[in-house]
Image (cartoon, grey):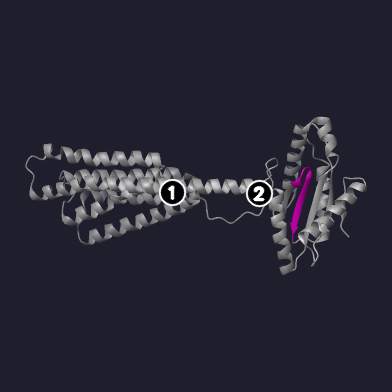
Amino acid sequence: MDRIKPKYLRSLYDLKAILMKVFLTFAVLAIVGTWWIEALESHINPIDRIAYPIMIAVFGISAFWLHLKPKSLRKVEYITFTTFASYCFVDFQAMLFGLPLFIADLYSVATFLQWLPMVYISAFIMLEIRNAIIASGLFYTSLVIPIVSYRFIQYVPDLASTQIYLTAMVVCFAHPIYILMLLGIALLKEQLVQIKTQAENMSVAATTDYLTGITNRRFATQSLDHLLELAKIENFHLTIFVLDIDHFKEVNDSFGHDVGDRVLICLANFLRQNLRDSDILGRWGGEEFIVILQKTDLQTACHLAERLYERNSEWVYEKVGHVTFSIGIATSRPDDTTDSLFKRADASLYQAKQNGRNRFEIAV
């Protein structure tokens, strides 16, 4: 209500939730497709006969649960990563040590090794950087230790197991590169997020009144300039209120500037609660505020002012009690500039002060 907000893309959290649902959906489809092809060729690893339905169930339920409860993203990420990493860990041990759970032929080994780096990618996408580093380090260690101990266990290796061992050794040298590259990308992403956050905070600080939290004079002036030009082009009414607290100097003199500041904050909150979402509220300076009413004719603006006075009569300000304000109202004309429109509203405000305060006057 008190500012024109730019239309940004979805937040990072919302975007991650969408990507996670897409990922889980395609993961289920990929597993189903792989299972179907391997079943046609009668070439399914014994471990996959158990793992495929488990992963389909976990990923499918997680995607559905994330659709129902988007705030469960973090839990879904951990469950998904743990499930996939556990599968890859067991598969790797079965492949390396020639367990009957894994058919150690070219197809199975090549297929498995192409998916293995996905563990690290999943870690850095789904987890926070610190947890991703820990998870990737633990998973890599779980691969290296069996490879190092392989020679002590496999006393008489055959040709096939030797080739698998050599392939696994290459994995030992290649995977740290994956981890370092992903870490670099994650750090760059974090830096970009911080820069964007700082830029947004600076933008908000430049257009927000530090005391009341509503827009400041700079932003209100820019908004008025823009909307006045738009009103001329689209031929709609633009009305402004220039609002000033009555006897504000007496409040400061009687209760102190701290109480006066709280009155300003309280009035800003009151106006925010009682104006429309399309109205722009700004602090013009001191105890003076401006309200920009888009596509609002004079009659509607007067009804809004009457409603503000009615509700303000029931509004209690801390330590001060009831506080009144005066309003000057002006509606734009085809030849208006920002300065001329504001001057007419300001003149009406002066007239309201002269006529007894706690009232509004209309620019003629």
Find residue 77 and name its label. none
Q: Which residues are magenta?
A: 284-294
Density class for disc 1 (Cα within 10 Å; few <14, some 14-19, many ≥20) is few
Tell me if residue 287 is in the magenta stretch: yes
| Residue found 27% across the figure and 60% down from its top | 36
Query: Picture coordinates of residue 25 (x, y %)?
Result: 39, 56
| Residue found 72% across the figure and 57% down from its top | 224
| Residue found 74% across the figure and 50% down from its top | 275
275 is higher (above) or lower (below) than 153: below
User: What residue is pinned by disc 2?
Assistant: 207
Q: Based on the displayed image, in which of its 4 quarters is residue 29 positioned?
A: bottom left
What's the magenta bit mostly, secondary-structure-wise?
A: strand
Image quadrant in which the C terminus is located: bottom right
Query: Picture coordinates of residue 243 (x, y %)?
Result: 81, 48
62 is higher (above) or lower (below) than 251: below
Of all residues shown, which one is farthest toward the front? 339
Task: Answer with mark 1 or mark 2, whichever residue precedes in sequence.
Answer: 1
The residue type indicated by label 1 comes to Lys
Query: Picture coordinates of residue 6 (x, y %)?
Result: 60, 55
The residue type indicated by label 2 comes to Thr
- Answer whether residue 318 is visible to the viewer in this image: no
Q: Secondary structure at mark 1?
A: helix
Q: Nearer the viewer, mark 1 or mark 2?
A: 2
| Residue found 68% across the figure and 52% down from its top | 219
Query: Picture coordinates of residue 90 (x, y %)?
Result: 24, 43
Alpha-carbon span between mark 1 and mark 2: 27 Å
Tell me if residue 320 is in the magenta stretch: no
- Which is nearer the eye, 216 or 155? 216
User: What residue is pinned by disc 1?
Assistant: 189
